[in-house]
Amino acid sequence: MVGFGLVDALKDFHNKTPFFLCLTGGILLILSGASGSIALAQELSDDFGLLFGPEFVMSFEIIMGILGLLTSMTGLAVIIGGLVLTTQRVELGRNIVLVAVGTGVLGLVMALIQSVMAGRIMMDLGLQMTQSLAWIGAILALQARIIAEQKPMMMQ
């Protein structure tokens, strides 16, 4: 029987393991919201308002909103980078994964800093789960970048 099976298609493609690591990491980043909770805590906003004025608070909230938007898209960017790793443009895929993971990690660190600055040193279970999923996803994507092979694709 002649046919195109999914199993046959998945057998022979370049950088299969890095692709599946990026896919898993990207899904974990998307599920976690990529940055934990990037929303600015009201206590932090009030304190900044007293120290620096309302203009600074507005600027800070805009910057955090932009960072939240960027970090929410890191999971998708990691998956796209994983797809590019399976083509001849492996170096481009590695760079896409690196930028996406860097942005996601920046968002995760900012969420932790905001939590500490708001006086919540102990994280609740929901934030711990979100942060854990995102960190695991970022580590998987970074590992995929490391093991992606820069070899020519075989012509069949």
Image (spheres, rainbow, N blue to C red):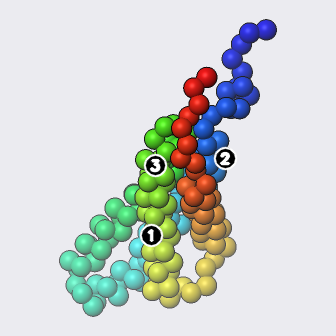
For the N terminus, the image quarter is top right
Q: Which residue is mark 3?
A: 91
| Distance CA(mark 3)–CA(mark 1) | 22 Å
Circle 1 SS class: helix
Q: Which residue is mark 1?
A: 106
Q: Is residue 56 left or right of residue 90?
A: left
Q: Of all residues shown, which one is farthest toward the right?
A: 1
Q: Which residue is mark 2?
A: 17
| Distance CA(mark 1)–CA(mark 2) | 26 Å
Q: Earlier in the sequence, mark 1 or mark 2?
A: 2
Q: Is residue 106 left or right of residue 134?
A: left
Q: Amino acid at mark 2?
A: Thr
| Tag 3 near tag 2, CB within 8 Å | no
* Residue 27 in the image, given as x and y percentages of width and height: 60, 50
For the C terminus, the image quarter is top right
Residue at position x 61%, y 85% in the image: 122
Badge 2, how many Cα within 10 Å: few under 14, some, many 20+?
some
Select label 1 or label 2 by which is in front.
Answer: 2
Select label 3 or label 2 by which is in front.
Answer: 3
Q: Earlier in the sequence, mark 3 or mark 1?
A: 3
Residue at position x 26%, y 73% in the image: 58
Q: Is residue 60 left or right of residue 95?
A: left
* Residue 53 in the image, given as x and y percentages of width and height: 22, 84
The image shows a total of numbered marks equal to 3
Circle 2 SS class: helix
